[in-house]
């Protein structure tokens, strides 16, 4: 049976980005849990969530022990920019990613843009990120790191808060449909 790995960017000891009264690690854990709950309502899938006490390297090690090329991975993040007008959602995939990773990423970015009502910044290669290489995208699973919205943009965050329940359902539906498709 295929597995969907849903991981929350940052862990209990790493807040990630902070802005507009929000901490990224709290937002990512909340959305991961909402998506997981919606998935359990609409599908019978094997779901793997990360342990909030694990570091990124521990999460990757655990995933690598069990992941196959039939599986999918979604890592949830919130973006940050010094320019507070920066807005939108971005999906990142590994350099040289398989087409099914790119397709998964396109659908997820489209979900966020449509539901939350923010700009779809599209699918980008990890080399276009601030880090250049994103370790979580290098497991056997087809993977997407999804930057939901800009934590530094008040409007993005207000819209996200208003629609996060609907967004969780849309993402869960995309995950279900993607696992059925591939």
Image (cartoon, helix red, strand yellow):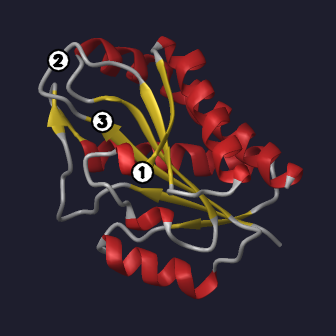
Residue 52 versus residue 86: which sits nearer the camera? 86
The numbered mark, 3 or 2, whose residue comes first in the sequence reads 3
Find the residue positioned furthest to the left.
Answer: 82
Q: Residue 83: where, in percent of width, then height? A: 15, 20
Q: Give the SS element for disc 3.
A: strand
Measured in 3D between alpha carbons, the distance from the residue under mark 3 to the one under mark 2, in whole angstroms, is: 11 Å
User: Does residue 73 appear in the picture of this structure?
Assistant: yes
Q: Residues within 10 Å of mark 2 (few under 14, many from 20)?
A: some
Q: Residue beneath label 3, please?
A: 79
- Between 132 and 161, the one lying in front of the other is 132
Q: Nearer the viewer, mark 2 or mark 1?
A: 1
Residue 154 at what x, y percent from top left? Answer: 23, 16
Q: Position of residue 53 (x, y in %)?
A: 30, 72
Which residue is label 1 attached to? 126
In the image, taking residue 64 as reference, residue 27 lies left or right, namely left
Q: In the figure, is residue 50 to the left or right of 85?
A: right
Q: Are discs 1 and 3 less than 8 Å apart at CB?
A: no
Q: Residues within 10 Å of mark 3 (few under 14, many from 20)?
A: many
Residue 152 x/y as whole percent: 20, 26
Q: Residue at x 24, y 19 (%)?
A: 153
Q: Quadrant of the N terminus?
A: bottom right
Residue carrying label 2 = 84
Secondary-structure class at tag 2:
loop
Give residue 65's quadrant in the image: bottom right
Identify the residue at image location x=19%, y=42%: 17
The C terminus, quarter of image = bottom right
Q: Is residue 38 visible?
A: no
Tell me if residue 50 comes above or below residue 78 in the rendering.
Answer: below
Q: Quadrant of residue 162?
A: top left
Q: Left or right of 11: which side holds 49?
A: right
Residue displayed at 54% across by 26% down: 112
Task: Compute the Cα span from label 1 to label 3.
Answer: 14 Å
């Amino acid at each position: 049976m295929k597995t969907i790995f849903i991981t929350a960017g940052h862990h209990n000891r790493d807040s990630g980005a902070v802005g507009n009264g929000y901490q990224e690690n709290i937002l990512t854990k909340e959305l991961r849990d909402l998506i997981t709950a919606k998935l359990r309502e609409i599908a019978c899938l094997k779901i793997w969530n990360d342990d909030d006490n694990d570091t990124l390297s521990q999460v990757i090690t655990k995933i690598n022990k069990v992941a196959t090329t039939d599986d999918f991975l979604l890592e949830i993040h919130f973006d940050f920019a010094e320019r507070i007008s920066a807005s939108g959602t971005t999906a990142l995939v590994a350099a040289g990613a398989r087409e099914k990773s790119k397709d998964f990423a396109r659908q997820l970015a489209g979900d966020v843009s449509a539901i939350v009502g923010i700009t779809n910044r599209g699918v980008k290669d990890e080399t276009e990120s601030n880090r250049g290489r994103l370790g979580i995208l290098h497991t056997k699973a087809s993977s997407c790191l999804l930057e939901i919205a800009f934590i530094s943009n008040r409007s993005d965050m207000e819209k996200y808060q208003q629609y996060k329940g609907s967004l969780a359902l849309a993402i869960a539906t995309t995950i279900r449909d993607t696992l059925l498709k591939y």
